[in-house]
Image (cartoon, rainbow, N blue to C red):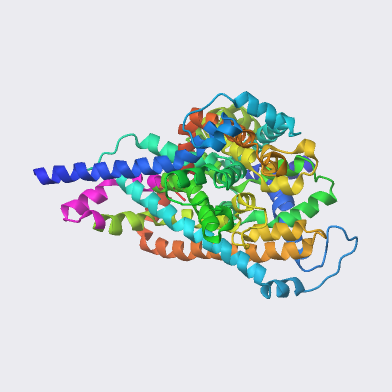
């Protein structure tokens, strides 16, 4: 290679790193400001921007709770809802995906295509009909209305199908059949233990989706005791906290920090999971 | 007797049963119900409701507010999608470039993806606080001398729309990057080597190898982004007053539907008709793009597809 080619490569690489640092700054500054301001007092926040945390976090927390906002309750509600949603999504989506991948039956291809079509249909727009249906069977203001629909979660089934197709399990299934295991027992005892990495990835996505979901609970849940975190966050913008900036930032930070921690631990699963859900079409 | 009958059903169906029942009850029925409601004047309060034919739809088509909401939604989606796919393509090319050898690709990608996991409700409230009159952005702009006076950002149509576009872009470019890059790395290296032997330059390789082979992935990104974009709610709803202010400039389809639903009388018939129209518009666009582009693609690579499907059947048989 000649010298000018090498020099050009260095310059190009330098420009690329500049671009990456700009994008990094844009990505992280809002999050960093949020976390820093959650630890600063309202007076400090009004005095100017800082990139260093302060010491007023507990003060802010007391202020946050003093105005009647039951954040721990919202936290517990969101956690309960997210865990239930995760269990239902992972179990039923793997069950469905297993049925499609392992068995042959008339209409198998149609069903697979139907799943893809469902992923591309904006189901949220039928929320009014859903609300009406739930109120008729008495499930409004009930978490069941948020959990039960996840039995038929097309996106998760699609992911499960992609994941199971990449696993060679037919021999193990045949072996279990020879041992006299029932088909459902094979699913529970042979497949589920093997699919733990895929189930974990699917579970993380289901958890985050439920944790962050605002629209559906906002429409369906009405009693304050059942409010989830995103619904409480929404009340932070109201008149009650108008000038208590530190408390507002802390409330917002507390609702996103758990997800950042989960991401710090499981980021590899999450990133490989996104690629798996899309590639191969 | 009953058990024998039960055993005749292919086992695959039994595994699909919960999904099918769940879909019929919580997926299909609400859609049918929404469509049925859209032809009535039902309100949340009233006991009785009447069939009004297509009155709701006629009213919507004549309604500036509805047209504006549809226009807003498209505008915000397109303005965030173009830079989103642009940055994703650019970074994917740079990350997979053998000459540049960029370090720490995994870390860059992981950081760029982070905003996608953050609660949109909290993100909207955060930007509301950052861009408040007494907020940090004004402090910075005035002290650094970019502005002589503090500005009311969230009362400006341009700034507010720009912010929604920015937040959407910020949330999604990392995910699009991961998907596009996974597609790029699955393209066989031999194709590029052969092109290099033939004397192709970087742009020619991108245009003639990368883009065509990336098409299924790009369609996937395009369609899923469109479907998500047409249902946009949390960010524009919570960034300002929940009515799409200022001047209804960030009032999206879903916000309008919610406003009709939550109005003092609870016009759920009218709200349903908004849902139905947007549902039809989005589904036609999404499925249309998917099938139109995919079919042409399948003709192009027919031989290799056949080979692939042959391989697949071999695998399932073994």
* Residue B7 seen in this snapshot: no
Establish if A70 lies above or below B216.
above
Residue drawn at the location 79% of the way across and 43% of the way down: B2
Quadrant location, the C terminus of chain B: top left
Asked whether residue A192 is drawn in magenta, I would say no
Residue depicted at 64% across the width and 29% down the height = A60
Coordinates of residue A243 in the picture (x, y in percent): 65, 39
In the image, residue B117 lies at what x, y percent?
Answer: 54, 40
In the image, the segment drawn in magenta is: B181-203
Looking at the picture, tell me which residue is in the foreground, A127 or B32. Answer: A127
Name the side, left or right, on which B6 lies relative to A47.
right
Q: Residue furthest front?
A: B148
> Is the N terminus of chain B in the top left, top right, bottom left or bottom right quadrant?
top right
x 70%, y 35%: residue: A81
Side of B171 relative to B12 (left or right) = left
- Residue B142 lies, in percent from the top left, at 47, 47
Q: Is residue B193 magenta?
A: yes
Q: Position of residue A179 (x, y in %)?
A: 59, 26
| Vertical order, A213 against A247 (above or below) | below
Question: From where the camera sits, is residue A60 visible?
Answer: yes
Count of numbered circles in the view = 0
């Amino acid at each position: 290679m000649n010298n000018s080619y090498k020099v050009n490569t260095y310059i190009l690489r330098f420009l690329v790193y500049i671009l990456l640092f700009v994008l990094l700054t844009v990505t992280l500054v809002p999050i960093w400001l949020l976390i820093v301001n959650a630890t600063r007092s309202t007076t400090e926040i009004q005095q100017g921007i800082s990139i260093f945390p302060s010491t007023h976090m507990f003060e802010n927390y007391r202020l946050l709770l003093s105005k009647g906002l039951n954040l721990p309750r919202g936290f517990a509600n969101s956690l309960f809802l997210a865990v239930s949603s995760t269990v239902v999504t992972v179990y039923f989506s793997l069950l469905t995906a297993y049925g499609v991948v392992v068995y042959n039956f008339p209409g198998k291809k149609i069903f697979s295509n139907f799943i893809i079509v469902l992923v591309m249909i904006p189901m949220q727009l039928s929320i009014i009909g859903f609300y009406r249906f739930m109120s008729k069977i008495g499930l409004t203001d009930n978490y069941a209305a948020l959990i039960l629909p996840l039995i038929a979660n097309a996106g998760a089934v699609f992911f499960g199908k992609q994941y199971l197709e990449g696993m060679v399990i037919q021999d193990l299934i045949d072996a279990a059949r020879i041992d006299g295991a029932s088909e459902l027992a094979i699913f529970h005892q042979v497949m589920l233990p093997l699919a733990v990495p895929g189930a974990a990835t699917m579970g993380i996505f289901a958890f985050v989706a439920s944790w962050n979901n605002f629209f559906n609970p906002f429409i369906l849940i009405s009693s304050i005791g059942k409010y989830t975190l995103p619904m409480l966050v929404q009340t932070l913008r109201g008149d009650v906290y108008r000038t208590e900036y530190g408390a507002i930032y802390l409330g917002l930070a507390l609702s996103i920090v758990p997800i950042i921690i989960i991401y710090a631990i499981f980021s590899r699963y999450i990133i490989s999971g996104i690629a798996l859900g899309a590639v191969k079409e | 007797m009953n058990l024998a009958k039960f055993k005749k059903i292919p086992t695959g169906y039994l595994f699909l049963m919960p999904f099918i029942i769940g879909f019929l009850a919580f997926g299909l029925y609400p859609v049918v119900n929404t469509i049925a409601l859209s032809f009535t004047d039902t309100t949340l309060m009233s006991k009785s409701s009447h069939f009004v034919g297509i009155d709701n739809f006629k009213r919507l088509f004549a309604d500036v507010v509805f047209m504006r909401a549809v226009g807003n939604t498209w505008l915000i989606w397109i303005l965030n999608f173009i830079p989103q796919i642009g940055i994703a393509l650019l970074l994917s090319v740079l990350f997979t470039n053998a000459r540049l050898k960029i370090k720490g690709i995994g870390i860059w990608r992981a950081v760029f993806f982070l905003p996608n996991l953050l609660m949109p409700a909290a993100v909207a409230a955060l930007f509301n606080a950052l861009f408040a009159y007494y907020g940090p952005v004004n402090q910075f702009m005035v002290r650094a001398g970019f502005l002589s006076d503090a500005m009311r950002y969230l009362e400006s149509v341009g700034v507010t729309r720009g912010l929604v576009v920015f937040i959407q872009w910020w949330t999604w470019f990392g995910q699009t990057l991961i998907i596009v890059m996974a597609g790029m790395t699955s393209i066989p290296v031999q194709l590029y080597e052969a092109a290099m032997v033939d004397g192709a330059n970087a742009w020619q390789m991108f245009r003639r190898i990368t883009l065509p082979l990336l098409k299924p992935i790009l369609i996937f990104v395009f369609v899923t982004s469109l479907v998500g974009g047409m249902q946009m709610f949390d960010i524009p709803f919570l960034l300002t007053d929940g009515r799409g202010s200022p001047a209804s400039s960030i009032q999206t389809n879903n916000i309008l539907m919610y406003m009709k639903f939550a109005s003092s009388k609870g016009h759920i018939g009218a709200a349903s008709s908004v849902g139905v129209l947007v549902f039809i518009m989005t589904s036609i666009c999404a499925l249309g793009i998917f099938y139109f582009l995919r079919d042409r693609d399948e003709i192009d690579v027919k031989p290799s597809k056949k080979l692939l499907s042959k391989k697949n059947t071999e695998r399932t048989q073994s």
